[in-house]
Amino acid sequence: MKIVEQDLKKGMVKILVQGKEDCWHVYNVVEKGDYVSAFTYRSRKGESDKIRSKKEEKERVYLKIQVEDKEFQKFTDRLRIRGRIVEGVDEIGAYHTISVEPGMEIKIEKEWKEWQLKRLREATKKHPKIVIVAIDDEMATIAKVHEYGVEEVATIYSNRSGKMYGDEDNKREYFGQILAKIKSMNLPVVIVGPGFEKDAFIEFSKGELKNYFVDSVSHSGMAGVYEALRRGIIEKVMKENRVAKEMKFVEEIMERIAKNEKVAYGKEEVKKAVEMGAVEKLFVLNSIVMEEEELIKKAEEMGAEVEIINEWHEGGSRLASLGGIAAFLRYEIT
């Protein structure tokens, strides 16, 4: 993402969407009532009065809409923003949907909150994806870590048991399938798992894998993938990945709760801490941001950092179990 122009006195930020995952960041900062302007395609005036052909003509127009709702399709990275037209064509008040894609320049006009501006600044940094392979002697799960969640790409089974376990042809086929899938994704790889199977796979893949990191976890499958994220293994390789960062935050929340150490969770407890000025860092689930706007604003006014945690990964689910909101404290409260 590139910030092309901004005038915060007028509440205007113009951005260039450079990659599909930038759509996720736009989704998180655009709210109902905001104004979004962009070049888009719309059926020619009067088309609705005719029987439309399958290939109806559309014209490229520059529109401004007032946002009413939005939709983001995870793992396809598609963002659609819907609202009423306020500028650009004669059909003022009519509904239109802007589909946001890489290469588009969009202008957002709104009352910006500090955490939203911070989110945009973070999005301008490079955030490459990464692949995690959680492997043991029975199966290997291959997952892609996006900015907003973890996508299970494939699970490959060894089909080895009993007498077949020591079959070298079977092992080569198992490892060969894993290696082919990893190479087709052309991304940095973290290979984790219990026992020695991961080491045997690295030995098999010598010269084929270039950008990889190996570590141990207790499980294979998606359980192993999430264990790697919780333990901060991904951050060792790629510090800027958003999901890894959020998972680490939630893991620290859980650790502090277990130790009863400078932490608050649940709406009432966090609200009390904010009002006392005790909050150092506030964590809010993305699905409840709108209803907690006043609390977020007050926390920022009191000097707290705000982090929005996505509900689409395990860390978000764990935060949801705490009421969707938690905070690190400057001092203990009673």
Image (cartoon, rainbow, N blue to C red):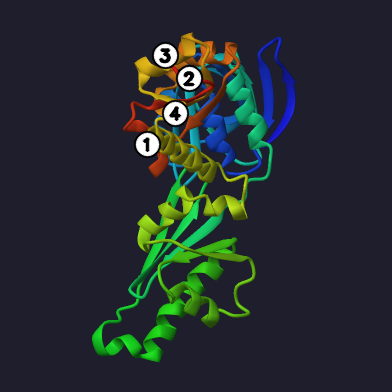
Residue 70 seen by the camera: no
Residue 29 seen by the camera: yes
Which amino acid type is marked by label 4?
Asn
- Between the residue at mark 4 and the residue at mark 1, the CA separation in whole angstroms equals 24 Å
User: Do the residues bearing badges 3 and 1 touch, measured as CB atoms within 8 Å?
Assistant: no
**Mark 2 Cα-neighbour bin, 10 Å: few <14, some 14–19, many ≥20:** many
| Closer to us: 50 or 10 | 10
Coordinates of residue 227 in the picture (x, y in percent): 42, 53
Which amino acid type is marked by label 2?
Gly
N-terminal-most mark, 3 or 4: 3
Coordinates of residue 209 in the picture (x, y in percent): 60, 73
Which element carries disc 1, helix, strand or loop?
helix
**Mark 1 Cα-neighbour bin, 10 Å: few <14, some 14–19, many ≥20:** few
**Mark 3 Cα-neighbour bin, 10 Å: few <14, some 14–19, many ≥20:** many
For this view, does 81 lie left or right of residue 16? left
User: Do the residues bearing badges 3 and 4 touch, measured as CB atoms within 8 Å?
Assistant: no
N-terminal-most mark, 4 or 2: 2
Query: Which residue is at a point 39% across and 33% down the rendered structure image?
Result: 257
**Mark 4 Cα-neighbour bin, 10 Å: few <14, some 14–19, many ≥20:** some
Query: Which residue is at a point 69% across and 10% down the rendered structure image?
Result: 10
The residue where tag 1 is placed is: 258
| Closer to us: 295 or 248 | 248
Which amino acid type is marked by label 1?
Ala
- Between the residue at mark 3 and the residue at mark 4, the CA separation in whole angstroms equals 17 Å
- Between the residue at mark 3 and the residue at mark 1, the CA separation in whole angstroms equals 21 Å
**The quarter of the displayed image where residue 6 is located:** top right
- Between the residue at mark 4 and the residue at mark 2, the CA separation in whole angstroms equals 21 Å
The residue where tag 2 is placed is: 83
N-terminal-most mark, 2 or 1: 2
Give the label on residue 271, or none.
3
